[in-house]
Amino acid sequence: MFAHLPPYAGDPILSLMESYQRDARADKVNLGIGVYADGAGVIPVLPSVRAVEVEDHFNSAPCTYLPMEGHTGYRQAVAQLLFGPELPDQNHLAIIQTLGGSGALKVGADLIARFFPQPQIWVPDPTWDNHIGIFEGAGFGVQRYPYYDADKKGLAFDALLSKLESLEAGSVVLLHPCCHNPTGIDPDRGQWTQIIEVLERRALLPFFDLAYQGFAASLEQDVWPVRECVRRGIAFFLSNSFSKIFSLYGERVGALSVFCPQDGQANNVLGQLKLTVRRNYSSPPLHGALIVARVLSDAHLRQQWEGEVNQMRERVHGMRERLHAGLAKVLPEYNFGFLLRQNGMFGYTGLSAAQVERLREQHGVYAVSSGRICVAGLNPGNVDKVCLAMAEVIRG
Ligand code: PLP
Ligand code: TYF
């Protein structure tokens, strides 16, 4: 019956995690998967989340089905967090709770594929691998637009802009509003303005994917491109994830928002989102959404959580500086200043796949073969070892 099924080669990043777990070396370092660990190397339970989890009424609430679109209070609180003062009214915004950011991408992709025949999406080169998997899986043709300039170790801005200029009206363009995965390179405000002007002029459909709100500059500043599209009346999709910024990876909490600037459309969009959900998994899970809704809606917990996001961002930034300083010390002939221009959890080191392999084999330091390291996996106890290991593989 199943003889014709080929084996699955495994996901490159998730397989790396499995190899890491099997590695018996005591001083191994996990810089592969994009997960935030604290200064002691532990994935934290945020105190704001813990405070909700120990509330009596939280634990005694019945575990009912949520509606297809998810928990109402959650959806309202998330919309407020994403859009702030630019929050569109109900007639212009369709928002549903999703299974993490991945689930939001999938529901959005399915919806577009159903109503826009032969859909094409342009994704940055490079991007999160699963963007390609999810959109191809939903029937899209996936194409790349220039994003990273390896020589400059920065944004290939002119090439990016002229590619967008050349796209057909209605083309879907995937954009990371902040903390680009895997490069950490983000457009600055002026560059974003120019990108958004092209999106508007060419009538393109942005699909923003926001997995790291608050990890670049702040919860407010990191969503500037999204809010700018609201101010200009540009229709867009927005997937967002709470996996990292609430440290709730396993709960699968996220949302999909569709901004509908024209009157009379949001209700039908919401209806079709619900139908897409119904056909896929009926309704989303409850527990994580209740936690996030409670934290976002309670003034005290909200303030506490914002402080926790700031702390995570600052810790990663501090480790980025430690890494930079450590590398400058052991490899004074190289310039690693580019690491300091990258945002968020990742460092795009420029290491080759062969160097990454030597890091893993000889030093027990796990990174992605593209040269991406998760800076959030560094801590005072392992950063010096990582610098020495990197120096050794760079010197060859
Ligand atoms: N989008 C990007 C850019 C990501 O980096 C990630 C997770 O690493 C996701 C989406 C998926 O998030 P989630 O774990 O909530 O599905
Ligand atoms: O490290 C990364 O880029 C991601 C992390 O269900 C990830 O691939 C892992 C599991 C998952 C979603 C994202």
Image: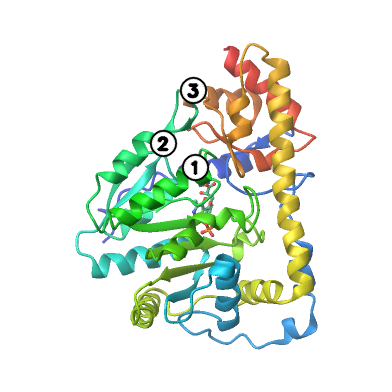
Which amino acid does the dot numbered 3 rest on? Answer: Ala
Ligand 1 closer than 8 Å to label 1 CB: no
The picture quadrant where one finds residue 364 is: top right
Q: Quadrant of the N terminus?
A: bottom left
Q: Secondary structure at mark 2?
A: helix
Q: CA distance from mark 1 to mark 3?
A: 30 Å
Please tell me the numbered disc located at residue 103. none
In the rendering, at what x and y percent does residue 179 appear?
Answer: 55, 46
Please tell me the numbered disc located at residue 354. 3
Discs 1/3, front:
1
**Which of marks 1 and 2 precedes in the sequence?**
2
The picture quadrant where one finds residue 253 is: bottom right
Q: CA distance from mark 2 to mark 3?
A: 29 Å
What is the crowding at mark 2: few (fewer than 14 residues within 10 Å), some, or many (at least 20)?
Answer: some
Q: Secondary structure at mark 1?
A: loop
Q: Quadrant of the C terminus?
A: top right
